[in-house]
């Protein structure tokens, strides 16, 4: 089930919210937890009942390991649990990639299984791996089955994260039924949900239409069109992911709970280190705690630290998708990350002494922010492309194709009916380049919101519900609902 769908907005969530608060208001703690679990199962099983069966089996198996490790923290049991989780993930997500790679390298012809990938399996698998490891380390006390099942299946963060920790959610589950309805949280959560929904359906999906056209017609693109496809995908991914995160946090708030921030204006970063403190924060946290530190972190010398960082980024690329293009994407981020660390350690202190003045510092910060955006956008080629070859062809189009007038068909992808009506009212539709106006307006709006303006969470901190704010949120809500018929899925559902 999608957050941006009629069934979620008009049926699922109203039933969930009403039923949950009816139970909690009567202090029926266990019943409220079971109700949330059942609603989460409905939410996940709505896509495919087989997905639900896989997740339920995963919950049951990992809970058994949790109980065993709670009684006796044996390393062998922990390793077995992690290995089984990774084996399941490998089978569903990487089996065909592994076989096709073997076929290419050794010239074999083993058959591919074309296995259906359960949505969100990477998220709930990593979440359960962290729970098992933390149980082995003694960081988790014996957890009731209902709390564990809710920890894994809680629907706001089930499909596309964040990857939550036990100490972030279990204490909140213990408070279910002990607190009264918090109307301020419901109001804040509603506003956050609407802002996230607007990012997704009004911006991400509109940019996505242009991106889909560009990748389907690489050979027809001129240099400017190809460059815009790359930038528009960076915008699409930003508003798709941040929109989902805002909606997830908003839904959780309306249920009286807080889930961690997973996305904090990464395009405002001025170096790749800062970028990864802002982008997919909980995944970065997972790899730091369970991969980077166990590998030795920075405790075994600078060279070993840089190798560990590269390993983490290669694994991050592979986590996002079963393909060499994702590994290239991870490598591009990893290499720049290591180079940035080297610069910060060896060159920045010297250059900082030479550079003086607030204005110069501000200029350097803006330039570095723009350069980082360009680099991340170029790396995003390999994140979006179906293959390395397709990404290389689009990159070559930017470098080598002749400069020509931008494609009218490409610009048509941005002709949102509601906004085109405004163009007509302003009598701009008769201008020679009127069909390009909306494309540039949307791009400018995207750049401002992503790189300059306050993000949704920051805006909600300042919002006070008055007449004008109520009208704005109402208009956005109606506009979003009217676009549901042409909606696309969330990009991170595939990971």
Image: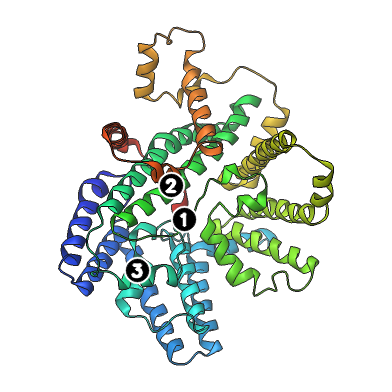
- Residue in the picture at 33% in, 50% down: 189
Q: Is residue 159 visible?
A: yes
Give the colour scheme of this rendering.
rainbow
Mark nearer the N terminus (2 vs 3): 3
Name the residue located 48 percent from the left edge and 28 percent from the top edge: 442
Left or right, residue 226 beside residue 195: right
Residue at disc 2, secondary structure: helix
Mark 3 sits on what residue? 172
Side of 135 relative to 30 (left or right): right
**Residue occupying the far front of the picture:** 357
Dot 3 or dot 1: first in sequence order is: 3
Q: Is residue 450 left or right of residue 166?
A: right
Percent of width and height locating residue 302:
79, 66
The residue identified by callout 2 is 457
Of circles 2 and 1, the one toward us is: 2
Q: Which residue is mark 1?
A: 261
Helix, strand or loop for disc 1 = loop
Q: Where's residue 161, x and y in %?
A: 44, 58
């Amino acid at each position: 089930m999608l957050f941006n769908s009629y069934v979620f907005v008009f049926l699922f969530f109203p039933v969930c919210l009403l039923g949950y608060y009816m139970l909690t208001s009567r202090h029926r703690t266990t019943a409220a937890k079971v109700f949330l679990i059942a609603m989460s199962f409905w939410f996940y099983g709505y896509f495919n009942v087989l997905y639900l069966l896989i997740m339920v089996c995963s919950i049951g198996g990992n809970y058994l390991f949790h109980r065993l490790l709670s009684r006796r923290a044996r390393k062998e049991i922990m390793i077995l649990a992690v290995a089984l989780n990774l084996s399941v993930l490998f089978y569903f997500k990487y089996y065909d990639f592994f076989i096709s790679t073997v076929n290419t390298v050794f010239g074999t012809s083993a058959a591919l299984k074309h296995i259906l990938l359960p949505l969100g399996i990477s998220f709930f698998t990593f979440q359960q791996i962290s729970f098992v490891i933390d149980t082995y380390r003694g960081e988790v006390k014996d957890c009731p089955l209902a709390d564990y099942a809710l920890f894994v299946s809680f629907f706001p963060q089930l499909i596309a994260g964040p990857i939550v920790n036990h100490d972030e959610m279990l204490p909140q589950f213990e408070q279910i039924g002990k607190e009264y309805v918090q109307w301020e949280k419901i109001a804040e959560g509603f506003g956050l949900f609407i802002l996230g929904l607007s990012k997704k359906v009004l911006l991400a999906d509109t940019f996505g239409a242009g991106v889909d056209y560009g990748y389907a017609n690489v050979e027809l693109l001129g240099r400017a069109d190809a460059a815009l496809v790359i930038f528009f995908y960076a915008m699409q991914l930003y508003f798709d992911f941040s929109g989902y995160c805002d909606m997830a946090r908003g839904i959780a708030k309306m249920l009286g709970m807080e889930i961690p921030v997973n996305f904090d204006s990464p395009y405002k970063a001025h170096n790749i280190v800062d970028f990864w403190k802002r982008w997919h924060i909980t995944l970065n946290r997972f790899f730091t705690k369970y991969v980077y530190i166990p590998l030795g972190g920075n405790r075994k010398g600078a060279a070993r630290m840089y190798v560990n960082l590269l390993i983490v980024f290669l694994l991050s690329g592979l986590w996002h998708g079963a393909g060499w293009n994702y590994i290239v994407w991870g490598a591009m981020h990893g290499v720049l990350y290591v180079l940035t660390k080297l610069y910060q350690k060896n060159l920045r202190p010297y250059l900082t002494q030479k550079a003086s003045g607030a204005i110069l510092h501000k200029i350097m910060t803006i330039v570095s922010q723009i350069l980082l955006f360009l680099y991340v956008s170029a790396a995003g080629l390999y994140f979006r492309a179906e293959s390395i070859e397709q990404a290389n062809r689009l990159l070559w189009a930017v470098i080598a194709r002749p400069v020509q007038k931008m494609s009218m068909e490409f610009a048509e992808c941005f002709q949102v009916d509601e906004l085109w009506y405004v163009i007509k009212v302003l009598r701009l539709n008769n201008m020679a380049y009127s069909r390009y106006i909306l494309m540039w307006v949307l791009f400018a709006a995207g750049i401002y919101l992503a790189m300059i303006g306050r993000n949704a969470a920051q805006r909600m901190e300042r919002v006070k519900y008055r007449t004008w704010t109520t009208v704005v949120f109402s208009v956005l809500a109606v506009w979003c609902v009217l676009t549901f018929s042409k909606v696309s899925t969330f990009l991170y559902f595939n990971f």
